[in-house]
Image: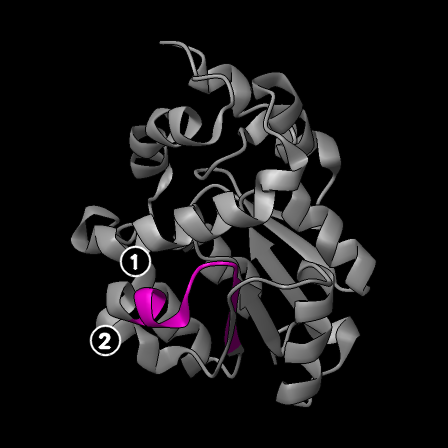
Amino acid sequence: MPAFSLAIFDYDGTLADSFPWFCSVLNQTARQFGFREVAAGEADALRALESREIMARLGVPLWKLPVIAVHMRRLSAEAGDAVPLFPGVEPMLASLAASGVTIAIVSSNGEEAIRGTLGPAASHVSHFDCGASLWGKSAKFKAVIAKAGALSQRTISIGDEIRDIDAARRAGIAAGAVTFGYNTAASLRARGPDLIFDSYEELTAKLTA
């Protein structure tokens, strides 16, 4: 029996290779909403920081965050095939589901856009909790756990950012992190997640052992 009965995945940077697209629209968004553009070669340094540190460094006005988030979700929905899945997503999800692990996706992105990018891989996902939330990601984790009828001690979240690890801890579940998304591997390891994965093969092996 797998150690976890429910795996809750983040989407951007965890299942979808959206960081290059994000970089391509960031400076346009900065000009539109009045914060500092990212200089050439600065993106790698920003990947080592928490989201709040990035916003502070770029001078993002906090009161504009809701409208910026709406803008980014709209751009993501319009991007379509410009945001591909990482190679190996479908077989990884299929392997987990075949091993008895229930799969969920929690994301601020829209469910329709996520399903469109997942394509056939969406058939392995039992629960979606997508879109903006007033109460944060940890509340979404708890809602999915309740919907799935799962136990917190047998649930793991899997994301690519420091804030995903923090949200998992607030929700009282295990925190897993992939090292190929938005935050750097070093910054994720420094946060001490319960499990860390350098590839989907490693993720599948650890979660189905």
Residue under the image location 35 percent in, 74 percent down: 94
Give the alpha-carbon distance from disc 2 to disc 1, as whole Å. Answer: 18 Å
Residue 18 colored magenta?
A: no
Q: What is the magenta range?
A: 103-115
Q: Is residue 46 visible?
A: yes
Identify residue for label 1. Answer: 77
Question: Where residue 43 appears, x then y in whole percent?
Answer: 44, 19
Give the residue furthest to the left: 81
The amino acid type of the residue labelled 2 equals Pro
Question: Where residue 68 appears, x then y in whole percent?
Answer: 49, 43
Left or right: residue 172 versus residue 15 is: right
Identify residue for label 2. Answer: 120
Residue under the image location 17 percent in, 53 percent down: 81
Residue 186 occupies which quadrant of the picture?
top right
Question: Where residue 130 appears, x then y in whole percent?
Answer: 50, 69
Which element carries disc 2, helix, strand or loop?
A: helix
In this rendering, the label closer to the viewer, 2 or 1: 1
Who comes first in sequence, dot 2 or dot 1? 1
For disc 1, the neighbor class at 10 Å (few under 14, some 14 to 19, many from 20) is some
The disc at residue 209 is none
Give the residue furthest to the top: 40
The amino acid type of the residue labelled 1 equals Ala
